[in-house]
Image (cartoon, rainbow, N blue to C red):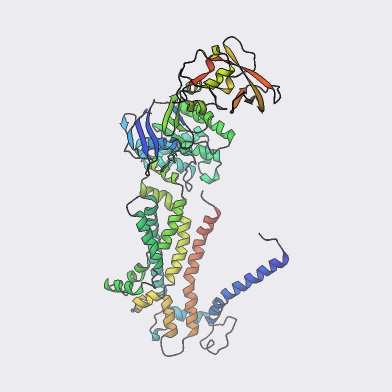
Amino acid sequence: MASITMDNLCKVYIGGVKAVSDVNLDIADGEMIVLVGPSGCGKSTLLRMVAGLETISDGTLKIGDRVVNNLEPADRDIAMVFQNYALYPHMTVFNNLAYGLKNRGFKKAEIDRRVREAAQMLEIGQFLDRKPRQLSGGQRQRVAMGRALVREPAAFLFDEPLSNLDAKLRVQMRVEIRQLQKRLRTTSLYVTHDQLEALTMADRLVVLNAGRIEQVGTPMELYSRPATTFVAGFIGSPAMNMLPAEYLKTLVSADDLAHLPQSADLIGIRPEDLSLAPPKEGEMALTGELMLLEPAGAESHLHLKLAGLKDIFVARLPQVPDVSEGTALTFSLRRDQLHPFDSASGQRVA
Amino acid sequence: MVENNRWGNFFAHVILILGVAIVVFPVYVAIIASTHPPGTFVRGVMPLWPGTNAWENYTTAITEGRSRAGTPPIGGMMWNSFIMAMAITIGKLSISIISAFAIVYFRFPGRIFFFWIIFLTLMLPVEVRIVPTFQVVADFGMLNSFAGLSIPLIASATATFLFRQFFMTVPEELMEAARVDGAGPMKFFKDILLPLSITNIAALFVIMFIYGWNQYLWPLLITTDPDYYTIVMGIQRMVTGGDSEPLWHLVMATVVLAALPPVLVILFMQRLFVKGLTETEK
Ligand SMILES: Nc1ncnc2c1ncn2[C@@H]1O[C@H](COP(=O)(O)OP(=O)(O)OP(=O)(O)O)[C@@H](O)[C@H]1O
Ligand SMILES: [Mg+2]
């Protein structure tokens, strides 16, 4: 068990691509950190720098109290779970799990004990004699987890471990990984581009954009107070609506926006903050024409056209309302649920 | 698949049978000729049914050969061929798998340059470089030796190239997983790459063995001592050596015997092949 400290980490690939810039992050012992961001933002690169599979161009990386910049992956006391599992195809499940321990000179009895313990934890005991090709995707995923587990490392590194599984299995494995991590209390760094995975698994969430950290915080912090327009657009589904403040002023009364700072020229509204109930004290009203109703079982997404606005405005309701397309609908919204941003810097202003 | 039409089927079989007949007939003639007494062959009428002299012909060929014409018994020549073919095969396989490993998994200065140099040697088979190679071998005093027979034929661009192609299909994560698991480059090679390459090795083994076994020009050039004659050149000497008519029954027996080891190698390696084809390890 150990903390991980990243101090101004940078990665420049040969050819000059700057994949990671000035990343500062302290991961506490036993914490589960999830890295999210759009494709190509440098998530895998950062993870692989921690693993030792990519060199560190600049900055310091510490695992525990050791600076590990120049250590081989094997000497960093970490274990990694790969997206495509990377199981050794010619070895049995048992040997896949045991290989890392054998290389480290563990005694046979100890290897046997650890492998069986991990196999039991992951319920792959009956597969120990099989080859990876004789397993289903989900079972392979468990073996890959097992290979990390038996090492009892200071930290787990996961690079989109669930992205090759079907939706149902993904939810199930997500829960299992999180439970296991909580039980073992092993520091973990988890890369995903699935925001539901990110929100549900993380102790703290790190949003990366073009190699830089946009925001770090608990999932609820990021959701309720996104620090930048990028985070606001990235976390939450459907994405937050962004309206120019100038435009909003023409729709609602001046009182509704009075509490916002002058510099706020872009206002974010979460689709799920809107409701069809009539406005009460402290709430404001917004009217739009319903273009499309998307029922989704327990909830629905309403695509609206606001007068004089090109972009579609989306509302999300916790039920499927009995309304027809083409009618005008009035929504209410609490004033303190507006997210004010400065459009030039993209920063939140209050 | 084309539609399963009766006439199409029939036609396909006719063509296949014809093809097989064309390939198999000469082999059949050789086997038949090796079972007849001396003289049958030269009389000009080729019998198509086995004769009665098989045992006698084969024992003479193995133990005695055509000693008076300067050709040793074929037992020794078979052994020489075997040593030469094995040395060439094992040498080629080990050198090319190691070079491919270096080229694919290590970043060193001149990597691409060396790859192209190896690749260029594809254009220089023994026949092309035979005079300079002979000179080198002679200067090293390797005429009439197994080293001289095999070393100049060991470098193999083909095998290096094939192993390189195969290594490039092995997912990179496998190497990374091994690194995290504490396996250095050599351990990765031994524990993971080599076992994964086993079917490729088997395939190349067969090809290389036959290549080595069938060498003709090179052994002919550098061996003058009958102790180092190989079977393929021995056959040639049996046909042309001496003043009398070639003893065709013995020549044919020798030919049949000479064809056996490659067949055995194929049969033996086939198990690995088929395994490799039926269970893809990925
Ligand atoms: N070996 C490399 N050489 C040069 N550039 C690279 C290399 N690997 C990645 N990059 C670049 O670095 C950037 C970050 O890549 P990275 O793989 O970390 O993205 P990612 O966030 O993991 O994306 P994804 O979600 O698609 O996996 C990308 O712009 C990519 O093109
Ligand atoms: Mg990635």
Instruction: Kindly identify the residue that appears in the image at 54 percent across and 26 percent down.
Output: A236
**In the picture shown, does residue B5 fall above or below B248?**
above
Residue B119: % across, % down: 40, 61
Residue B190: % across, % down: 39, 51
Looking at the picture, tell me which residue is in the foreground, A27 or B69. Answer: A27
Quarter of the image holding residue A254? top right
Residue B193: % across, % down: 42, 51
Instruction: Kindly identify the residue that appears in the image at 56 percent across and 79 percent down.
Output: B29
Residue B160: % across, % down: 41, 59
Looking at the picture, tell me which residue is in the foreground, A111 or A204. Answer: A204
The answer to whether A220 appears left or right of B157 in the picture is right
Quarter of the image holding residue B47? bottom right
* Residue A185 in view, yes or no: no
| Total labels drawn | 0
Quarter of the image holding residue A169? top right
**In the picture shown, does residue A115 fall above or below B136?**
above
**In the picture shown, does residue B1 fall above or below A179?**
below
Looking at the picture, tell me which residue is in the foreground, B64 or B98. Answer: B98
